[in-house]
Amino acid sequence: MDITISLAAVTIIGTFSGIAGYFLMRSKYKRELAKGRSREAELATKVYETAVLKEIGERIGYSLDANKIIEIISGSLGQLLPYSTVSHMILKDDRISFVTNVNESVSHSFINDVRGKMLAALSEMLMEVKLDVDVDESISGAILDESGSLPVASFFNLPIVISGRLAGIINVASKTEGLYVGDDTAVLYRIAIGASEAVSRLQEVLEEEKGKLAAAVESLSDGVLMVDKNYQLIVANKKLRQLLGTIESPKIFDIVNALAGTFDLRIKMEEVMSGAEPVASFEIVLHDKVLAVSAARVSSQRRQKPIGLVVLFHDITDAKALEKLRQDFMAMMVHELRSPLTSIKSTVAMIKSAGVGTIGAEDLGKYLQNIASTSETMLDLVNDLLDVAKVEAGKFDIVCDRADLGEVILERIESFKPQMAARGLLIEVDIEKDLPAAWFDKVRIKQVMNNLLSNAIKYTDAGTVKVLAAVEKVNGAPIDILVSVADTGIGIEADQAEKLFSKFGQLESGRGHGELKSSGLGHYITKKIVEGVGGKIWMESAGAGAGSTFFFTVPLAAGAKRDQAGQNLVVPQGQGLLKNFTTTKVGQ
Amino acid sequence: MSTIEDYQSLLSDLVKKQMVMLGPAVALTNARKISALTVAGDGSVTAISGDPQAALDALANQYMNLSGQIAQATLASLLEKYPQIKSQTSG
Amino acid sequence: MANIIIVEDDMNLANIYQQKLTAGGHNVSIVSDTEAVKEITLQKPNLVLLDILMPNVSGLDILREIKAESSVSGIPVLLLTNVAEDASIAKGLELGAYGYLLKSETTPDLLLSRVNMTLEETAPPKI
């Protein structure tokens, strides 16, 4: 009997434990299950949220359209909530577009009710009492059921705010009562806010980048015109407005007008946009400027479809003028060389026709002298041209050394004395006593003296040629040697003086006084030489008939202060060579 | 000194505006999440227990989670009508 | 025996031409480009040798002026030029020049014969 009771007790207790255990297990299991289910629901919601945001991200791409977000969110609702209609209102400049998608059949008055509620919400949000704009309505989806009379029983609104501006709202409405009270709507609000913020941030970045790009384009030195694929104006930068002479904010119409008489912009744009050639280049003349115009089609990188057009306007007026100057110069040089040759040929013909054996000595002498002097002229010209070519090619050698400038000057003057005497000109020389040693290229400076002296003689009919050389001092310190060659000749006008030392000076000032022709290159080369040794050259003249004076400086040799100002090149002391002295721009 | 009535009035206005903007069910549900508030079906706040400022801040936060800047703007304009009440979450 | 005016800035050449033509029995004077129109109108020569490219006044401008002046428009003008393809030649012929010569290709002898030929062709009809 005792054993039985114990056994029974154990069994009962065991059973109770078992049963208790079972119940405990079960409730634990249930709890787990419930947790599992709510986790499942949570997960489902999370999945939904992620999916929608991802889709928005993909679909938005480069065009940040509030419309797109609104459409995507509206379209995805079906997966999440029961509803009768989903609608959205998008705020445009002067109107509101109202789009409704009907899921479960409702009556027209239902839709009107939705509309009213949405407008009320918008008013509230914008804090305007009455929205006085047109509403464009559009309904799609299931057919309306006019017999139904159920009003809007439940609804909620999702505002979409982008970059601080209310872009629109989404409305979800149902005939069924009591909906949208739970947290199922919360996820939509989160999505709406998340997407709006993302778009806002993107938009801000884009605006900033656009701003930078716009600033860059605006400051370009070429005129830039950009249109989209519908020929709507996107960019017309400052240079373009200047070149065309349009107002501050032109329309495409203004631009087409401004180009009237040069080319038809519209036709050109169409050709490039849809033609075989994606680029068109040509030149036009507008308002006394020559412009190189280049129109290019812009295609999207991914799909190679045309998305717009860029037209570039590049001012080549100066380049063209320079080109013309060069061509004229060439033509002139050709002529300058042919003339003496023709002269020589004719002279030879004269000798031959008179007969080499029978021609008189006097005539022969005259002809030969002709040939000699003409050849000299030609040779000078050819040498000058060669020097200019060397200067241009950077191969004009200037080799400096310590030397006595006074000696060089005197020697040159001696060689010109016969010429001067022949023309009845007097020569005055004043070279400072004990002139310090200078640093220069003897051969080249001789060339300079030749040029200056021969010009002085050529352009002076009577009077004196005066040559001075002295040390220049600044605050008592010697800086360089100043040389001047003054004549009492025909002088130089102010406007000619400007172009005197330029390569094309001859062309521009129309120099040449009958037999006193010069190629004009001599002065150009002289200037290059003087600057090449580190000096400066200039001319002073009181005008026509008042004579002219040419000044140039030569640096002092080591041991004396150098003149820093006006030197194009620093001549290193102790080095004998200054090779590859490069010229700067042509036609200065 | 602002009174409970002022707070109640302000809160009621807030809820009612949110009912128009976001929809009645959503606005009420979220208002009722603030335990300190007793909210009627039309949006009026009939009772506030505890610190009314805290309740205001809590409700403002709740709505901002839903409509972000809109809620902020609404609150700001309402506060103009009740200058005695300051909000920590406005501005 | 004709009166001829040469308008040419290259003195060497002008002198040679003058010498040749004088040896050919003509009366030749050389004038500068600036004096050309005046001298031609004054002297009314039988023929004018006119250089196109000159420093101060263009030969074509001189040509234009004398062709516009009735008292001298009938005088035959032979243009002197260095370049064969020059558009100026065409222009000159258009303006009424009688013909042209390439200086580089024309020996003084040829010049004389061309001048004589021109004088013959343009001489007023003999009664």
Image (spheres, rainbow, N blue to C red):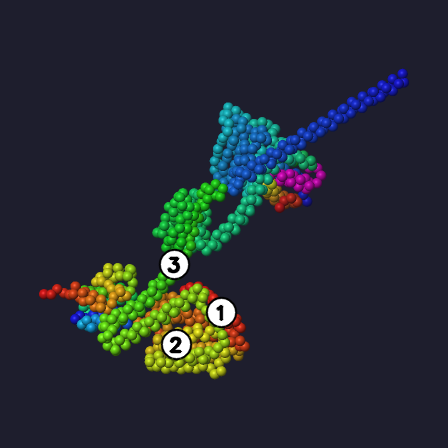
Gap between marks 2 and 1 measured at Cα: 26 Å
Q: Tell me where the magenta segment starts and ends, as one range.
A: B48-67
| A35 drawn magenta | no
* Residue A453 tag number: 2
Farthest residue in the left direction? C127
Gap between marks 1 and 3 measured at Cα: 34 Å
Marks 2 and 3: CB-CB under 8 Å?
A: no
Indicate the quadrant where residue C74 lies. Answer: bottom left
Q: Please give the name of the residue rendered at 37% of the width and 73% of the height, measured from the top-left corner.
A: A492
Answer left or right for A307 relative to A204. left
Q: Please give the name of the residue rendered at 37% of the width and 68% of the height, measured from the top-left corner.
A: A382
Q: Nearer the viewer, residue A169 or A29?
A: A29
Name the quadrant of the C terminus of chain A.
Answer: bottom left
Which callout, 1 or 3, points to the residue nearer the camera? 1
User: Which comes sooner in the sequence, label 2 or label 3?
Assistant: 3
Answer left or right for A57 relative to A292. right
Q: Which amino acid does the dot numbered 3 rest on?
A: Lys
Q: Is residue B7 above or below residue A150?
A: below
| B57 drawn magenta | yes
Residue C22, percent from left and from top = 20, 73
Q: Nearer the viewer, residue A471 or B61?
A: A471
Q: Which amino acid does the dot numbered 2 rest on?
A: Leu
Q: Please give the name of the residue rendered at 79% of the width and 23% of the height, measured from the top-left corner.
A: A18
Q: Disc 3 marks which residue? A: A320
Q: Disc 1 marks which residue? A: A578
Q: Chain of mark 3?
A: A
User: Which comes sooner in the sequence, label 2 or label 1?
Assistant: 2
